[in-house]
């Protein structure tokens, strides 16, 4: 279902010096916004839905003649590789350098994955290029404790329209304890930055809440067979399983866990809230899995219904919640560009970064603003369960994920 509508759209570098001639012909000015997502590999379908969400905003701006007197070009870069079979941090770093080296690029949307975010952040920081992720949740990237590693130039450049796994993992642990009433759990991760991080935060909170930890193990995303570890888990007889990770290992886990642990309560983070999981693992294997997203369930908000319908009409498939957070990320960038242009300043990377930092914008998911580290101030985590709706396509995110509610935020 991956469309290849021009993976890279390059725009020429444009001088934005504040001369009278440049101001007089502001309508002819062009600036570029980047998009970096894994459009190759295990998460390509979800990456496409995220890209399309961002493009909705940019296409709207183009239809109105640009923003703040500027024409917006979009540079779409793929950080997935056939070798990795999913996102590839090395490719993400290459893409970051490509954006930084193009003087017309003033901001970017992405990445989808935290492993890519960790690789990109130091490069973007040195290039003074702000990026807004609609889906990567590892807290280290924006944690001031790691500022020297991920933002060596000082200022926050990695912004989020989702909250982090400092909330997503622990709140799901609260849900396991308070709502599912389980007494024991086995935890898995897929060895990636996101998977390990969210599994760690889930486990720490689960133990704090008195959930008996029967074990922790790691899945190799490139291995085909997880039956040995699943058989070991079965012998321990836990009440539940928690998986931190994304689709490459997740699809195989869902399929094989259905065969070996069919009655076990199973859940994960937003890596399991995925059209790729639905499409790759199928039904009945997916049925019953719980998962979270690191934000509100905007898909079912009546206020977002016209947008959801417009997305489905334009792209021929239903969006996911992170399509909306990508749209909101793009809207934040466009709003920042507009505010800089209207202030009379040149639309530079630094000026756009500062404007993003000071954002106070009403979006589809609600009011968006950021703390000094780039994290969205909202801390909502939403819980879903996969419940098969045979009347809808199996990979339809709107109808195959049943919204349970906001995850408990207890201590």
Image: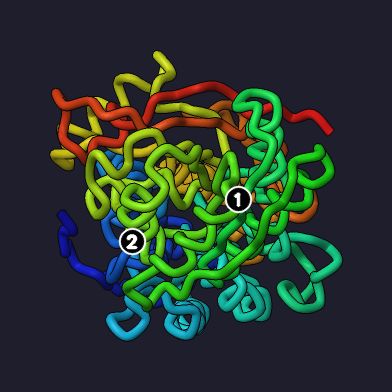
Say what secondary structure mark 2 lies in. helix
Dot 2 surroundings within 10 Å: few (below 14), some, or many (20 or more)? some
Contact check, label 1 and label 2, Cβ < 8 Å: no
Nearer to me, 358 or 94: 94
At x 50% / y 53%, what residue is drawn?
234
161 lies left or right of 208 = left
At x 64% / y 33%, what residue is drawn?
182
Say what secondary structure mark 1 lies in. strand
Residue at the far top: name it.
Answer: 302
Asked if one can make out residue 25 in the rendered structure from this viewpoint, the answer is no
The image shows residue 169 at horizontal and vertical percentages of 66, 46
Q: CA distance from mark 1 to mark 2?
A: 29 Å
Residue under pointer 2: 252
Residue under pointer 1: 160
The image shows residue 49 at horizontal and vertical percentages of 30, 48
At x 16% / y 64%, what residue is drawn?
4
The image shows residue 156 at horizontal and vertical percentages of 73, 62
Asked if one can make out residue 267 in the rendered structure from this viewpoint, the answer is yes
At x 25% / y 39%, what residue is drawn?
284
Nearer to me, 141 or 286: 286
34 lies left or right of 197 = left
N-terminal label among 1 and 2: 1
The image shows residue 310 at horizontal and vertical percentages of 23, 29
Q: Is residue 121 above or below residue 132?
A: below
385 lies left or right of 347 = left
Which of the 4 image quarters holds residue 389? top left
Badge count:
2
């Amino acid at each position: 279902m991956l469309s290849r509508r021009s993976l890279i759209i390059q725009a020429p570098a444009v001088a934005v010096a504040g001369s009278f001639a440049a101001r007089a012909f502001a309508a002819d000015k062009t600036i570029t916004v980047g998009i970096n997502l894994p459009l190759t590999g295990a998460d390509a379908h979800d990456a496409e839905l995220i890209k399309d969400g961002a493009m909705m905003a940019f296409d709207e701006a183009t239809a109105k003649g640009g923003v703040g007197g500027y024409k917006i070009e979009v540079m779409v870069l793929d950080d997935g590789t056939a070798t990795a079979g999913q996102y590839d941090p090395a490719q993400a770093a290459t893409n970051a350098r490509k954006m930084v080296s193009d003087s017309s690029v003033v901001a970017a949307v992405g990445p989808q994955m935290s492993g890519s975010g960790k690789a990109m952040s130091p490069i973007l920081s040195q290039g003074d290029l702000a990026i807004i992720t609609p889906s990567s949740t590892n807290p280290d990237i924006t944690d001031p404790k790691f500022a020297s590693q991920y933002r060596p130039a000082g200022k926050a450049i990695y912004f989020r329209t989702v909250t982090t796994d400092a909330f997503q993992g622990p709140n799901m642990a609260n849900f396991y304890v308070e709502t599912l009433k389980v007494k024991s759990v086995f935890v898995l991760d897929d060895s990636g930055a996101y998977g390990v991080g969210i599994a760690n935060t889930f486990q720490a909170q689960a133990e704090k809440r008195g959930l008996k930890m029967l074990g922790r193990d790691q899945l190799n995303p490139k291995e085909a067979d997880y039956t040995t570890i699943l058989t070991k888990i079965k012998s321990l007889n836990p009440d539940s399983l928690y998986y931190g990770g994304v689709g490459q290992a997740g699809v195989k886990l869902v399929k094989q866990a259905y065969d070996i642990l069919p009655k076990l309560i199973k859940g994960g983070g937003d890596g399991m809230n995925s059209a790729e999981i639905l499409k790759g693992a199928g039904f009945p294997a997916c049925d019953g899995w719980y998962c979270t997203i690191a934000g509100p369930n905007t898909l079912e908000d009546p206020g977002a219904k016209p947008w959801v319908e417009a997305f489905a009409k334009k792209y021929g498939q239903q969006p996911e919640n992170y399509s909306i957070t990508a749209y909101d990320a793009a809207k934040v960038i466009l709003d920042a560009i507009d505010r800089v242009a209207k202030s009379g300043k040149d639309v530079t990377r630094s000026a756009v970064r500062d404007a993003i930092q000071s954002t106070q914008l009403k979006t589809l998911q609600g009011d968006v603003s950021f703390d000094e580290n780039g994290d969205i101030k909202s801390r909502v985590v939403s819980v879903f369960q996969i419940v098969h709706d045979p009347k809808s396509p199996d990979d339809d995110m709107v109808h195959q994920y049943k919204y349970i509610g906001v995850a408990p935020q207890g201590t």
